[in-house]
Amino acid sequence: MAEPAAPAPATPGPTRPEHWDAHYAAGRGFAPLGDTERRLLADLCPARAGALALEVGCGLGELARHLAATGYRVDAVDCSGEAVDRAAAAAGPDAATRVRFLRFDIEDDDLGALPNPAYDLVVFRLSYAFVRDRARLLRALGRRLRDGGALVVITPVAARTPAHKRHIALDESEIATLTGGWTQALRRDADGLAMLVLRGPVARDATTATSTS
């Protein structure tokens, strides 16, 4: 099962930039992008002409570089300056022309300061579990999707995650809350990770079934 490398216990807590700066400075990272994830993203979220993607919690930039290689122009943001610096340094010349790595705290900074007002794809890979105010952020990012755009969350599932790593995963109740405010919610298995593809944000109190077909 693919899962993030759990950050070592530190103070301040795991939602703060200083924690993640120490995490990346120590040479830690997250599980590499898997072939199943690549295939599902290609099938479910192909890049159309001029497509823009926002990756939230880009870490060392592997997914951002992959999205760029498949045709997206990517704004890749992370609250950790250490991660952003390392990601930018690892980008080759081709990726550097299609990816902007930005030190940006998606919860605390003004979303109006993002480089683009709207995106075809917004993706959280192994980062959504660390968001503090999930409902507020999802509503705000939903308003920044272009017509036909998708918000994708790739996450460990609590039932498949050891108890001491529970903080990196979502349980079924959290997944239901996440998918409930969208007109379309697809769920796919990516080698033990849940990939949730959400389209059409609707009213806050609306609910919708999650399709696994």
Image (tube, grey):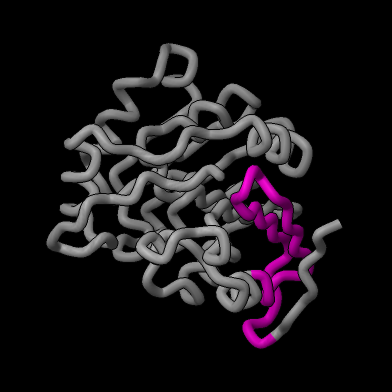
Q: Quadrant of residue 199?
A: bottom right
Residue 21 located left or right of residue 173: left
47 on left or right of 171? right
Q: Determine the residue located farthest toward the top in the rendered image.
A: 93
Name the one closer to the observer, 110 or 70: 70
- Which quarter shows the N terminus? top right
| Most distant residue in the left direction | 11
Q: Residue, x 71% and y 84% (percent of image)?
A: 206
What predominant SS class does the magenta segment belong to?
Answer: strand
Q: Quadrant of the C terminus?
A: bottom right
Image spot of residue 48 (x, y percent): 74, 34
Location of residue 168 in the rendering, given as x and y in whole percent from the top left corner? 42, 59
Residue 115 in percent (x, y) is at 43, 44
Q: Nearer the viewer, residue 29 or 115?
A: 29
- Quick check: is 127 in the magenta stretch? no
Between 40 and 47, the residue placed more toward the observer is 40
90 w.r.t. 203: above or below? above
Please give left or right for residue 180 compared with residue 213 in the image. left
Q: Residue furthest bottom?
A: 205
Residue shown at 49% from the left, 59% from the top: 161
Count of numbered tags: 0
Rendering coords of residue 42 (x, y %) = 72, 34
Q: Bounds of the magenta span?
A: 179-205
Residue found at x 71% / y 33%: 39
Residue closest to the eye, 35 or 98: 35
> In this view, which residue lies farthest toward the right?
213
Query: Which residue is located at x 76 percent, y 58 percent?
Result: 186
On screen, residue 169 versus residue 194, left or right, reads: left
Q: Quadrant of residue 205?
A: bottom right
